[in-house]
Image: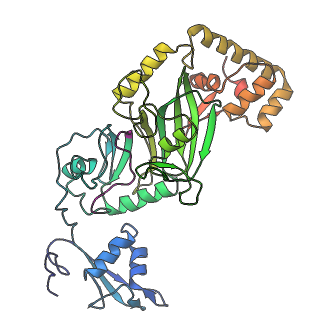
């Protein structure tokens, strides 16, 4: 079979030839069976192989709907990925947190767009990756080779990129099924009234500004769910930690603006306000990433250090508002005394012990509520701060009080 102009023919040049035998007693479509046999290849990529004439059944070029019968011999020719003529490799510096033959985890800086778009065909993370990983073209898509998930241009932190089609399919599946965990930090305007919360609101195009997104109620949006926790109260600002159940475009930024706590420095969703320090964009950082290795299955965890501008912002806010969550030494001492008094009371009172054991002994928020009901001023963060004292375990990016924690420590 001759080569099609611009493309290699079946078996031409470098590539991989797979020979498979259909074993089932009942017929099945060629495309569906190949997808099941080659889970590392996406359905669209299998379809491209068939359309290009790279699949034969008993020596005859197959079609997607070709029915397979017992004993049919299927040959699949997979040429190497084609180069992308409009994407050029560029020697842009990358902050690599981890890399092996299947994936690369990066600490993305502010100002770096992940993939090309109209009017922005170079200077992106993809251009840098093409220079760093020459085999990346053709993995996943023409404009987003290897990209598993996105970060906004000015959002910093952890991002994972697949270096093979098999890794891409499996990592994207982990994102969709929430096997992969992503934790974000952000500084927001205002002081949330609660210590924790969940924002549920469908996100769609803003009704008055199509360049923005918003929480919409007309059925046009997609379900979005964001969990948040206050880490520090900083006067007129707060440092929050976020975990996502969904991954919509601008999700954290839109949800924060929706509850009237927009992210500091956000040029789109926060009204212009004078900032304590100059920022390149929103103070939003993908601080941690957890995933199963796409090939070995090993659980892996990565952390990206805060960028200098974010750190400078926190230092300045703490300096200005030392009476916030970054409390003075005297206030911390008082908090420790309150916690110690509560622990002593629990040790003396079997009823309190039973209440803690029966309700939420591992939940710092619930424990703090029980303490307040018993007349003790205890904040959840006071319990978390004692992680090094043996009261708390850090598991899967969250804190859990140990069983009968009141018996531990001094």
Quarter of the image with the N terminus is bottom left
Q: Position of residue 184 (x, y in %)?
A: 47, 38
In the picture, measured across the screen, residue 172 lies left or right of residue 145, that is right
Q: Main secondary structure of the magenta part?
A: loop
Query: Who is closer to the viewer here, 268 or 227?
Result: 268
Q: Is residue 81 above or below residue 221?
A: below
Q: Residue furthest front?
A: 208
In the picture, measured across the screen, residue 191 lies left or right of residue 404, that is left
Identify the residue at horizontal 17%, vertical 44% (top origin).
91
Identify the residue at horizontal 66%, vertical 15% (top origin).
335
Q: Position of residue 301 (x, y in %)?
A: 44, 42
Q: Magenta residues, as a range?
A: 142-157
Identify the residue at horizontal 46%, vertical 13% (top origin).
319
Q: Position of residue 32 (x, y in %)?
A: 43, 80
Give yes or no for residue 167 being in the magenta stretch: no
Query: Who is closer to the viewer here, 226 or 75?
Result: 226
Picture quadrant of residue 304 = top left
Q: Is residue 392 above or below residue 183?
A: above
Query: Who is closer to the viewer here, 398 or 141?
Result: 141
Q: Position of residue 59 (x, y in %)?
A: 26, 91
Q: Is residue 404 visible?
A: no
Quarter of the image with the C terminus is top right
Q: Residue furthest right?
A: 351
User: Number of labelled discs?
Assistant: 0
Give yes or no for residue 144 being in the magenta stretch: yes
Q: Is residue 93 visible?
A: yes
How are the residues colored? rainbow
In the picture, measured across the screen, residue 30 lies left or right of residue 357, that is left
Identify the residue at horizontal 40%, vertical 52% (top origin).
149
């Amino acid at each position: 079979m001759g080569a099609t102009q611009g493309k290699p023919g079946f078996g031409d040049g470098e590539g991989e030839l797979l020979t498979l035998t259909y074993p089932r007693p009942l017929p099945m479509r060629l495309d569906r069976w190949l997808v099941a046999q080659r889970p590392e290849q996406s359905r669209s990529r299998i379809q491209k192989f068939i359309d290009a004439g790279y699949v034969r059944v008993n020596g005859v070029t197959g079609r997607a709907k070709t029915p397979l019968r017992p004993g049919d011999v299927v040959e699949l020719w997979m040429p190497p990925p084609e180069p992308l003529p409009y994407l050029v490799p560029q020697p842009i510096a990358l902050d690599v947190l981890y890399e092996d033959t299947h994936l690369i985890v990066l600490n993305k800086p502010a100002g770096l767009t992940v993939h090309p778009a109209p009017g922005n065909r170079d200077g992106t993370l993809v251009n840098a990756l093409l220079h760093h990983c020459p085999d990346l073209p053709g993995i996943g898509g023409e404009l987003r080779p290897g990209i598993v998930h996105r970060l906004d241009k000015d959002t910093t932190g952890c991002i994972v990129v697949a270096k093979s089609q098999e890794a891409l399919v499996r990592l994207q599946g982990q994102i969709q099924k929430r096997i992969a965990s992503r934790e974000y930090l952000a500084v927001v305007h205002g002081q949330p009234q609660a210590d924790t919360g969940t924002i549920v609101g469908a996100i769609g195009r803003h009704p008055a500004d199509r360049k923005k997104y918003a929480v919409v109620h007309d059925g046009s949006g997609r379900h979005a769910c964001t969990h948040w926790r206050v880490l520090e109260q900083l006067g007129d600002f707060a440092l929050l930690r976020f975990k996502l159940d969904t991954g919509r475009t601008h999700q954290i930024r839109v949800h924060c603006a929706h509850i009237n706590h927009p992210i500091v420095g956000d040029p789109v969703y926060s009204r212009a306000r004078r900032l304590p320090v100059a920022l390149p964009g929103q103070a939003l950082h993908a601080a941690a990433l957890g995933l199963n290795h796409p090939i070995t299955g090993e659980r892996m965890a990565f952390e990206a250090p805060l960028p200098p501008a974010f750190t400078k912002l926190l230092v300045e806010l703490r300096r200005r508002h030392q009476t916030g969550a970054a409390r003075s030494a005297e206030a911390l001492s008082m908090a420790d005394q309150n916690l110690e008094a509560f622990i002593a009371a629990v040790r003396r009172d079997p009823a309190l012990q039973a209440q803690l054991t029966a309700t939420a002994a591992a939940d710092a928020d619930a424990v703090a509520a029980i303490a307040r009901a018993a007349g003790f001023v205890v904040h959840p963060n006071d319990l978390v701060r004692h992680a090094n004292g043996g009261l708390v375990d850090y598991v899967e990016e969250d804190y859990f009080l140990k069983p009968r924690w009141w018996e531990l420590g001094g």
